[in-house]
Amino acid sequence: MSSTALLLWAKGPGFAFAAAVFLFGVTLRVVEMLWLRRRPDRSVARGSGALQGLRTVVSRFLPAPGLVARSPVVHVGGMVFHLGLFAVVFLYGPHIAAIRGMTGLDWPGLPTGAIDGATVLTIAAMIVLLIARSKDPVRRLLTTGADHLAWTATLLPLLTGFLLVNRVALPFETLLAVHLLSVELLLVLFPFTTLMHAVTFAFARYYAGAIAGRKGAHS
Amino acid sequence: MTLSLGNGLAALREQIDAPVAAFFSSCVHCGLCAEACLFYTETGDPHYAPIRKLEPLRRLWSREFTLFGRIGAALGLSRPLTEADLAEWEVLVYDSCTLCGRCSLACPVGNDLTAMIRKLREGMTAAGYAPEGLKKAAVRALTGISPVGVGEHSVRKLVEAQAAACGIPIEMDKEGADWLVTISSIEFIAFPEVLGALAKLFKAAGATWTIASDAYEATNIGVQIGSRDVAGTLVQRIVDAAHRLKVKGVVTPECGHAYQALRWEGPNLIGAAYDVEVIHIIDLLDRWRAAGKLKTSGKDTSRLTYHDPCQISRRGGLEPQARRLMAMVAADFVETADAGPWNWCCGGGGGLSANHRAKDLRLTVFGPKKRQLEAVKPEGLVTACSNCRNILEEALQHYDMDLPVLGLVEMLAEYLDEEPS
Amino acid sequence: MSTKPALLPLLDSHGISRRDFTKYCTGLTAAMALAPAMAPRVAEALERARRPSVIWLSFQECTGCTESLTRADAPSLEQLILSAVSLDYHHTLQAAAGHGAETARLKAMAENAGQYLVLVDGSVPLGDPGYSTIAGRSNLDILHETVAGAAAVVAIGSCAAFGGLPAAAPNPTGAVSIGSLITDKPVVNLPGCPPIPVVMTAVIAHFLTFGRLPELDSLGRPRAFYGDTIHDRCYRRAFYDKGLFAKSFDDEGARKGWCLFELGCKGPTTYNACATVKWNGGVSFPIQSGHPCLGCSQPDFWDAGSFYRPLSQPWGADGHLAANAVAAGIGIGVAAGMAAIEAKKRAAAERQPVTLADLEVKP
């Protein structure tokens, strides 16, 4: 198979399959989650659950005070990783072009150098977090094989993207195909692994905020 | 015998809802909940990671309430829950969680782990895996009124003695009183002076109150052990008494879990909204303060700090009220580190104080509280939860720390102007 | 070798001085990525070269490659070099026709056995040979016959190199590249639609100078010309790196000369020398004229979707597929949710309440 054919497959049938699995799986999981509903709360509210729920979706982006000092690596590493990943995925010109082409949405991006730096930082954070995970007894106990799968599936697009942008090894077209395939692997695994948190976190935070909010409590 | 694995699993299935699904779907095993948990920070045992304590509930959800999990189960990729699992988790679910809620506040994806532990306990109890101490307390509460066996006769004697001591009559079962006040058994046993303090405060505010002879107990062991059936029965008692006595509202005393149980879980446990107001005493006192009904003179000049009871501050949001009241009586108030929403638990919440086999662990996890206090060296420790107060006194004694623990209601009554407003 | 006049006198007759020729050789040396010291050797070789016999076969093609060489704006050196070779057969250009033409080919093959070059443009219809025949003979037949005695084969243009437009899906003629048919002779691919003229002459010059073909990459292309991508050599690269893209052909970005990536430029995947050698005597190249690179020298470019779709944009999933996937997710999600609610209801019906007797601790 020529690199062009591979790229064509990755962009065409491969992407179709990955996108279908991703959209189907994520929708399914969100719908089956929401379908479980909540019992109506008969207590008289002291505050607005919905308002605090929405506030908590945003406020939990900030680290918990006091915990940063206890787990600096997880906090700093996690913050760098998530911000970096966001920048790399959503603020890189070619990525924006792809999203614009598929959805019509458009926004300004960052210079290639910034994205390159973010990629290096993100990968570094991932490695640091993996090491921290392997050294910490709690995370060692909690970690499953699926976590490592999700980690690998997240690293591959970053790594292939970096090699692609910097023309390290392999022809561009081959690397682009491999990069797309790695993204497709990520999309396919997404609904079946902890990667789902990237969607469900908003619901979880909302519920936690709403539960606390109607009591006038903290979240 | 209704208790069985099957019954426990049925109880757990009933507890699965959209938030549970969202929480488990979102966990990335970051372990930060452990860093917020006093059982982990004080022991370093990874099994105390809050999310780990929820493993039985997570497995049930994943296996039975997700399509992919059900397919996986059909393919033999996951194991069903067994008696052995529940037996193993009993100590984690009951002995190493005070439902303090720090993990819920710490979780980056917003998982309310505490709410899920509460749910998991429903299944544990229904399957027969609840600690003996809690079961015994539940039996006492169901057969009598109080989980520690404070009988109606004792209550009457205590009420009479305190009324005499403060010089204000306290009439039990008084129909048409404004407020039905519930009392924690710990207060009857260890801090009965609070009755006299309440009498002074209600008199000053110009409100009438009463205690019901068949529903004086505020605490709800059903919520601690995790049984909606028991908890609902206990809530219904108070609701019935409120109706019988035609009161306008029900006051929950200085007890954190009693507040959560009666104020928030209660209507859902009995399946009906209340037709009377239910309010925590601190909230009520602050309302009177704002209305100018409480006048105090003089202040305590010793260095005082406030212990935020988890269910009242973190999970109740009543710490500003408590501080406003403290400001009326404390001349030298000092905050500890992590005060307010992030305060550390005394170690006795969530049924731990009734779970005697966990006593050593309870004293171990007093560590953070101890360090908080050592850092600011107060001369008095005020709180608004009699269970906290009792546990704090016990732990302070254990660690040879000479520090009086005071109740906020009593403090306020002490500096109250006797003239009614 | 043919006995026709050597190169230099011929150039002289066209008004090309020796100085011009040396300059050209230096340029050619650079273009081939040879050391500057090699320039005299290139000049010497070209000077000395007896005009080699070249047979140009045209199969399924559009004559664009020939146009590229012959329709230059001025009598270029490329043209002269080409006229300096002995083009013994080229059915578009030669005067002879019919039997005369075919006889010329056979004659050249016999006279220069083992030494002549075969230049091919166009692909070969392998599926149905009837699509392209010359004098009633299939392209495949003619190719095999002609190549048998050749020194090397040069596949000129994307059709000869990779199949080209005739091979575009569904490839009705069963078109294949020359390289896929020739296994026993060196084949050099000079893809491009059309290829850059100097690339063709440089390869011939290299062959004349060194007696062998230049260094090739994995796709059989001379590294000297196909070693870098258009993107890597593009003068608009700085805009790409700054994240400045034209979003339409008439927007501010387009007027400011920003990167054409979002308008579908295939520069990043296209290995060719357009950005450095340029076209029309070094005047310009498509990107300079404001149009994205089509990637015409890359295999399968004809099937790589719209020229105007960004390179990074997959096309497999359209709104229809997305809607179907989401609809299926909702449908099955609702079904799974309903089953879960049923399970909860069953559990509620099955569960026995915890009673006093249950809580009594047995001694």
Image (cartoon, coloured by chain):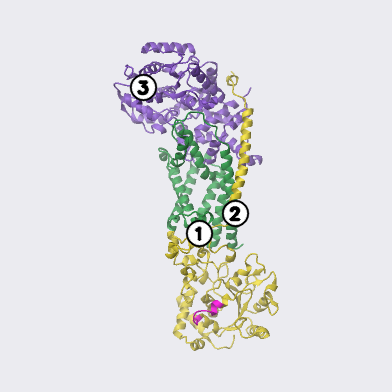
Q: Magenta segment range?
A: C67-77
Mark closer to the observer (3, 2): 2
Q: Is residue B406 above or below residue A123?
A: above
Q: Quadrant of residue C100?
A: bottom right
Q: Are marks 3 and 2 on the same chain?
A: no
Tell me the element at label 1: helix
The residue beneath circle 1 is A164
Tell me the element at label 3: loop
Query: What numbered label is drawn on residue C225?
Result: none
Left or right, A31 with respect to C133, comes to: left
User: Subunit of mark 2?
Assistant: A
Local packing at callout 3 (Cα closer than 10 Å; few below 14, some 14-19, many 20+) is some
Residue at the image position 60 percent from the left and 49 percent from the top: C325
| Number of marks in the rendered image | 3
Screen quadrant of the N terminus of chain C: bottom right
In magenta segment, residue A146: no
Kindly check if marks 3 and 2 are in contact, taking CB atoms under 8 A apart as contact.
Answer: no
Instruction: Answer whether residue C47 is visible to the viewer in this image.
Output: yes
Chain A: its colour in the image is green
Q: Amino acid at mark 2?
A: Ala
Chain drawn yellow, letter?
A: C
The residue beneath circle 3 is B404
Q: Amino acid at mark 1?
A: Leu
The Cα–Cα distance between marks 3 and 2, rounded to whole angstroms, is 70 Å
The residue beneath circle 2 is A16
Screen quadrant of the C terminus of chain C: top right
Local packing at callout 1 (Cα closer than 10 Å; few below 14, some 14-19, many 20+) is many
